Image (cartoon, helix red, strand yellow):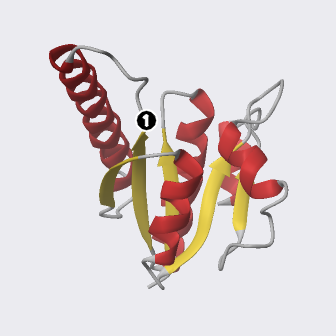
Amino acid sequence: MRTYLVVIDDSPEASLALRFAARRAARTGGGVIILAIIPPQDFVAFGGVQATIEAEAREHAEELVATAAEAVMQEGVTPQNMIKSGKPAEVVREVIGASDEIAALVLATAASGAPGPLVAHFTGQDAGTLPCPVMLVPGGIDVARLDALS
């Protein structure tokens, strides 16, 4: 099955990438993998504080994924949800490497300013190293236009 991988975070553009992927999956009989990444935390000398920070980050990631999953299900697609910890580019590469079904990595650019770190990474020096295409959704695109394209 053609599956679209979407990395979700708090950015407004992440919801655009998710919408595009969900709508494409619905129209092509494909699937969506929603991936929330918990980046490595800075070292804290006290274990209890570190554990609390990590628990809060995981809880936030679970909330993001749950909200994203609801949006995907509204398009008639049941997503696969993932929460992984690590350096974002490495985690994305590992997830793609572990599944032959991932047809594309769907990311969205910021509406203005510099691209996010994943967009910069996978469209820069590592652009040709993935086994699937990278689809970029413009962060400033009108939702009606996005819907027409997807």
- Name the spot of residue 29 as percent of width and height, x first: 45, 79
Instruction: Locate residue 64: give its quadrant.
Output: top left
- Name the spot of residue 134 as percent of width and height, x first: 71, 64
Instruction: Locate residue 60: give its quadrant.
Output: top left
Residue depicted at 60% across the width and 42% down the height: 16
Is residue 137 visible in the rendered structure shown here? Answer: no
Instruction: Locate residue 148: give its quadrant.
Output: bottom right
Please state, as top left, top right, bottom left or bottom right, where the N terminus lies in the image: bottom left
Q: Which residue is mark 1?
A: 40
SS class of the residue under badge 1? loop
Residue found at the very far left of the displayed protein: 48
- Name the spot of residue 21 as percent of width and height, x first: 55, 59
Label 1 crowd bin: few (<14), some (14–19), many (20+), radius 10 Å: few
- Name the spot of residue 79 as percent of width and height, x first: 33, 61
Q: Is residue 7 left or right of residue 57?
A: right
Q: Is residue 120 left or right of residue 132?
A: right
Please state, as top left, top right, bottom left or bottom right, where the C terminus lies in the image: bottom right
Is residue 10 visible in the rendered structure shown here? Answer: yes
Q: Is residue 54 left or right of residue 5?
A: left
Residue depicted at 84% across the width and 54% down the height: 124
Residue 121 versus residue 60 in the image, above or below: below
Residue 133 versus residue 140 in the image, above or below: below
Q: Is residue 120 left or right of residue 7?
A: right
Amino acid type shown at disc 1: Pro
Count the numbered circles shown. 1
